[in-house]
């Protein structure tokens, strides 16, 4: 007889990030992007966000294990930044994403990383997160590169100057491509 013992760890995966969240100092969502179906409904996502906020907003640490997930986080003035990965994920990788996001936003907002400035620059936030993580895969950890690429993409056409028709056409294209994947 032969006994085969398999470890609990899973195969290494490029899909490192499960979610990127930014909450305000009341624990309310300002930005949330989930990359898998761990929390499939908005109701489940908001419950998770409340739980994560309640467990982390009074602590000085940077890492938490919560609901079987690794959570790295940082707060600044009235914002809480979270990057979430699976329980076996490398905290340093998640922290690199968190620091890249924070440092990118810090440069883009001219070091004024607070709720109002962020809300006025949501387009930049969306572009920055898309440059750092795509579908849960970490693409970039250098804030200089992220800021540079966001500036290039932002120069295409400022959202305020796009017509409603252009925005709708762009949305249709994105939906079409997401269905074809």
Image (spheres, grey):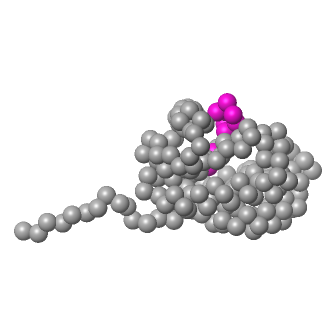
- Given residues 161 and 23, the one toward you in this image is 23
The C terminus is located in which quarter?
A: bottom right
Q: Is residue 73 above or below residue 49?
A: below
Quadrant housing residue 31: top right
Kindly tell me whether residue 74 is visible in this rendering: yes
Residue 178, how many percent across, how many down?
Answer: 62, 55
Could you tell me residue 83's position as x and y percent? 59, 51
The residue located at (72%, 44%) in the rendering is 76
Is residue 37 shown to the viewer in this render? Answer: no
Count of residue discs: 0
Residue 20 included in the magenta stretch of the image: yes
Q: Look at the image and say whether residue 101 sits in the magenta stretch.
A: no
Task: Locate residue 160, reporting x and y percent.
Answer: 90, 47
Where residue 98 appears, x then y in whole percent?
A: 64, 55
In the image as oriented, which residue stretches furthest toward the right?
161
Furthest residue to the front? 60
Give the position of the N terminus as an image quadrant. bottom left
Q: Residue drawn at (66%, 65%), measured in percent from left and top?
A: 141
Nearer the observer, 17 or 177: 17
Q: Residue at the left extreme?
A: 1
Q: In the rendered structure, which segment of residues is drawn in magenta?
A: 19-31
Report whether 179 appears left or right of 128: left
The one of 40 and 115 positioned closer to us in this rendering: 115
């Amino acid at each position: 007889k032969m006994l085969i013992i398999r470890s609990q760890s899973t195969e290494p995966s490029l899909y490192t990030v499960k979610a990127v969240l930014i909450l305000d100092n009341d624990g309310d969502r300002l930005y949330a992007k989930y990359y898998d179906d761990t929390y499939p409904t908005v109701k489940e996502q908001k419950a998770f966000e409340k739980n994560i906020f309640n467990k982390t907003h009074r602590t000085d640490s940077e890492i938490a294990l919560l609901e079987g997930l690794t959570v790295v986080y940082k707060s600044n003035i009235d914002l809480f930044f979270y990057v979430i990965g699976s329980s076996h994920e490398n905290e340093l990788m998640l922290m690199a994403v968190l620091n890249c996001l924070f440092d990118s936003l810090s440069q883009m907002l001219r070091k004024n990383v607070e709720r109002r400035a962020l809300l006025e620059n949501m387009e930049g936030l969306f572009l920055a997160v898309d440059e750092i993580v795509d579908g849960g895969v970490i693409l970039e950890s250098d804030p200089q590169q992220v800021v540079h690429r966001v500036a290039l993409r932002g120069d295409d056409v400022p959202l305020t100057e796009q017509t409603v028709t252009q925005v709708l056409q762009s949305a249709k294209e994105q939906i079409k491509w997401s269905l074809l994947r």
